[in-house]
Amino acid sequence: MTFNPIRRASRALAVVLACLAMTGCLSAKMYVDPALPKVAKGDLVQAAQPQPVQVLFEFRTKGNANSRATEQIKPRVVAVAAESGLFSNVSSNVNGGGVLKVVIDNVPITDNAMAKGFGTGLTFGLVGSMVTDGYVCTATYSRNGVTTEATAKHALHTTIGNHAGPPGLAALDPQTAVNQVMDQLTWNVLKQLSDKKAFD
């Protein structure tokens, strides 16, 4: 079963999806917030002698472990670490080398999101709404008794019913939007760690 970010993004979305099942007239669109810088391999400070790394990952919802989301997102985090070129070998079970621990916590941002979603459902989408989910990514890299930490924040906006999206942002399907947010968070914390010379 694939990870469906709409189903767990917020209570407001759950209410709206229930109304959608009854009416068939609502649609949800997602928009990736542009505030977090886009980072690529070329932006990282590469280590002179890359070491192997063990990647540990956990996804949380409001601070609570979310095993299903962890299972679905972890391969993306591992893939970004491998693509970064910062490590000689990337795995979940590397002996020796360093340990990269990444935790992404989904925290609701929109005030009174439940009421907004319920209002949209009652009007059958004629009055739309927008909810925003926040994501806080904390990464630590430990090697030879030294631990370095980095943190990045991101946001995902979801419109439901007859509501315009944030100006200048393209609407994405839910899976693509969530994947972009997870990847961008991982790239950004790796850049911070590389800037701090954590991998030297």
Image (cartoon, rainbow, N blue to C red):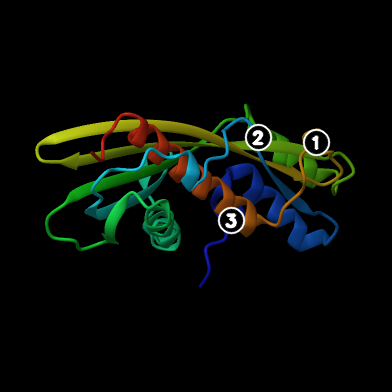
Task: Tell me residue 89's x, y (percent).
Answer: 27, 60
For the point 10% across and 40% down, the residue is 144
The residue lying toward the viewer, choosing from 129 and 105, is 105
> What residue occupies the far left of the structure in this picture?
145
Task: Tell me residue 92's x, y (percent).
Answer: 26, 61
Quarter of the image for residue 91 reads: bottom left
Determine which residue is flagged by label 3: 7
Q: Quadrant of the C terminus?
A: top left
Could you say whether the residue bearing mark 2 is in a helix, strand or loop? loop
Inspect the image, locate mark 2, and give the three-letter code of the amino acid beneath it. Answer: Pro
Q: Are marks 2 and 1 in contact (CB under 8 Å)?
A: yes
Task: Tell me residue 149's x, y (percent).
Answer: 29, 31
Q: Any mark on residue 168, and which?
A: 1
Could you say whether the residue bearing mark 3 is in a helix, strand or loop? helix
For the point 78% across and 61% down, the residue is 22
Quarter of the image for residue 146 reads: top left
